[in-house]
Image: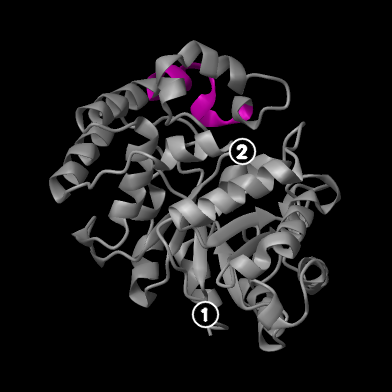
Amino acid sequence: MSVQIPGKFAYGTMSMTWTPEPISNEQGFECLKHAIEKHNTQLIVGGEFYGPNDINMKLKEEFWKKYGANYPDLIVSMKGGFNLQKFAPDGSKESVTKSIEKLASYFPSDKSKRPKLLFEVARVDPTIPYEQTIGYINEFVEKGIIDGISLSEVGAGSIQKALSVAPVSVVEVEFHLMCQDILHNGVLEELSKHNIPVIAYSPLNRGFLTEFAANDLEGYLKLCNRPGDIRGGLGKFSGDNFWHNAKLVKALQEYAHKKGTTLESLSLLWISSVGGSENLYGIRKIPKILPITSGTTVPKIDRNLGSPIELTRQDLEEIKAICDAHPVKGYRYNEQAEALSFA
């Protein structure tokens, strides 16, 4: 069986731990509680490799020990199956087994005393048939060690392969106003056939779709080019591409202000408004799409989610026209990584 995903948003925890200065457990707990209680976020997303020494999983373990009884419907989705030395996905049986057993070790074995657990291999390992990888994961679902399967960065063909083996609860892909690939590459169309929801990661394009970036492009670019900041090596943030793409950011900010909201809020609401739409982008019924919001302080969370508006069909058409007039330039990551995108 697949796990049903409630709510309008998911909450991502990578920025809490995969950083030179991880936040404290207490600060992380405050953010998690706020996202769950104020913004009805029931799906928490993380990764085995989001920081050293399992710090991301340990954060969730401690949160559940302290507050889990208050949130019996919580769902935790964790990425694993990734070789950091080679910086490549590893969908082998040994890798999947190691990652899932590690994930399960941080929570009670009694299903009634832990959150629902989803597991996904981070991207498709091109060296192993995808059906085999999904089969390895499904063995743990059938044993009750985890509750469901997520997919990460998959193309339409990989979705079909996965579904030939086991039910899929949710698919995690990059999707935002500056990365609309799934509208046109068959991924969203395939998911619509099975009504499988999407969780959209990096919904603010690594901070580019924010009031801060739009108001201080020079300052934001300096942050991107700090030593160790991943954004400095990404195609959309590099050289002339940055300034070309900044024109779209400014145009979207202007539209957000016209609607009486912030660029952050517009960007997130656009994603959730596309989800569930009928007869849009040539798709009869688009499945639910949940942006993976984040934030390492309560004010940041509220800044992202605190100015909600309703987007009409006309609004979606007007936003599409803005994006069409300012096509994005540059790779999502880089030329080498492109082979693993929507594989």
Q: Is residue 235 magenta?
A: yes
Residue hosting label 1: 2
Left or right of 244, for residue 297:
right
Most extreme residue toward the top, as rendered? Answer: 218
Distance, label 1 to label 2, CA atoms, is 30 Å
Residue 150 or residue 67, whichever sits in front? 67
In the image, what residue type sits under mark 2? Thr
Residue at image coords 72%, 21%: 227
Disc 2 packing (10 Å; few <14; some 14–19; many ≥20): many
Mark 1 vs mark 2: which is more N-terminal?
1
Looking at this rendering, what residue extends furthest in the left direction?
A: 314
- The region drawn magenta spans 233-245
> In this picture, is 308 found above or below 121?
above
Q: Quadrant of residue 209?
A: top left
Q: Height in image: 21 above or below 289? A: above
Q: Mark 2 = which residue?
A: 296
- Determine the residue positioned at 77% across, 31% down: 20
Is 291 a magenta residue? no
Q: Mark 1 is on which residue type?
A: Ser
Question: In the figure, is residue 311 to the left or right of 226?
Answer: left
